[in-house]
Image (cartoon, rainbow, N blue to C red):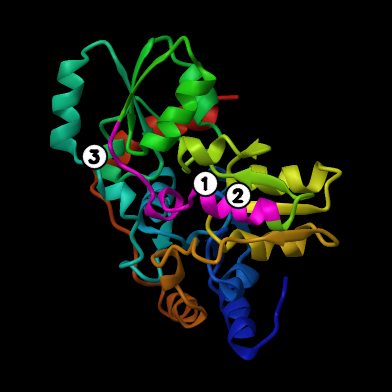
Amino acid sequence: MVQINPVQQRIRKLAKEKDIVILAHNYQVPDVQDIADIVGDSLILSMKATKAPQRNIVFCGVDFMAESAKALNPEKTVIHPVPSSRCPMAHMVDVETLTAVRKQHPGAAVVAYVNTTAVVKAEADICCTSANAVKVVASLKERDVIFVPDCNLANYVQSQLPDKNIIPWAGYCHVHQEITREQIQALMDEHPSAKVIVHPEVTGEVIALADKVASTEGMITYAQQSEASEFIIGTEEGLVHRLKKEVPGKTFYRLSSAVCPNMKKIRLEDVLRAVETLSPTVELPKDIIERNKRPLERMLSVK
């Protein structure tokens, strides 16, 4: 655990005293990542949240992540330090429109990317993350799959599973959508020996340039195992902080424009306030919690 200033030291002290586990997504600012007990992608954090023995969870990520932690741990107190840290893509799908689309495809399964709100997950048959989306869809008996809300991830899954009929939503992550082929090509021209790793939320023309398509956790594993020493990272720039820590001796080139302003809203002072006050808490209606648990737990059971 990196402890470099008094604020971080106080956070760690209070977390121990108050039985708190601090979870942080890979896109959080560096000093928040450094103070967390667990840093990871959505799948890792979902899994770890269910296994953490602490009775309180401080979740440093965007809104849907904290909601998922609450749904999977209804008996625990889940604190989201900055409630305005919201994922725009998660709000690009609503229950009413999803219900209408489902009526148009009565035999289709509904797969909800975890980047959705709790009320939308309640309508899904199963959830997925970018790390396990292909495995989740492959596990379904249905050929037709309504995939919400990320069209780019849906298209990537379709490319990997040609026997499935993926019905994509029109949503997208603006950070990954704005990563262009020209940006990646410019870095490739500048660093010809570098391997290109991109997130499956990017567009197909960017994926076409990649040596590896992976979730943020998969990117770390690939960098660790690859014989290459240089990598172009096609995702939100916050991941590079963790890559430098966990894969020392290798070089990573980030896209300076790939910044999620919502992920960056949580600062160290917000985490301190959260552990001091055990607030703001995430509250979900009991029926939504029950209806979220099934698709989330079904996702976690896919091997």
Amino acid type at image mark 3: Asp
Q: CA distance from mark 1 to mark 2?
A: 6 Å
Q: Position of residue 86 (x, y in %)?
A: 33, 60
For disc 2, the marked residue is 185
Label 2 Cα neighbours within 10 Å, binned few <14 / some 14-19 / many ≥20 = some
Q: CA distance from mark 3 to mark 2?
A: 48 Å
Q: Position of residue 2 (x, y in %)?
A: 72, 75
> What type of secondary structure mainly makes up the magenta span?
helix
For disc 1, the marked residue is 181
Q: Position of residue 82 (x, y in %)?
A: 37, 71
Q: Is residue 183 magenta?
A: yes
For disc 3, the marked residue is 287
Amino acid type at image mark 1: Arg
- Residue at (28, 37) in percent of width and height: 170
Amino acid type at image mark 2: Gln
Marks 1,2: beta carbons within 8 A: yes
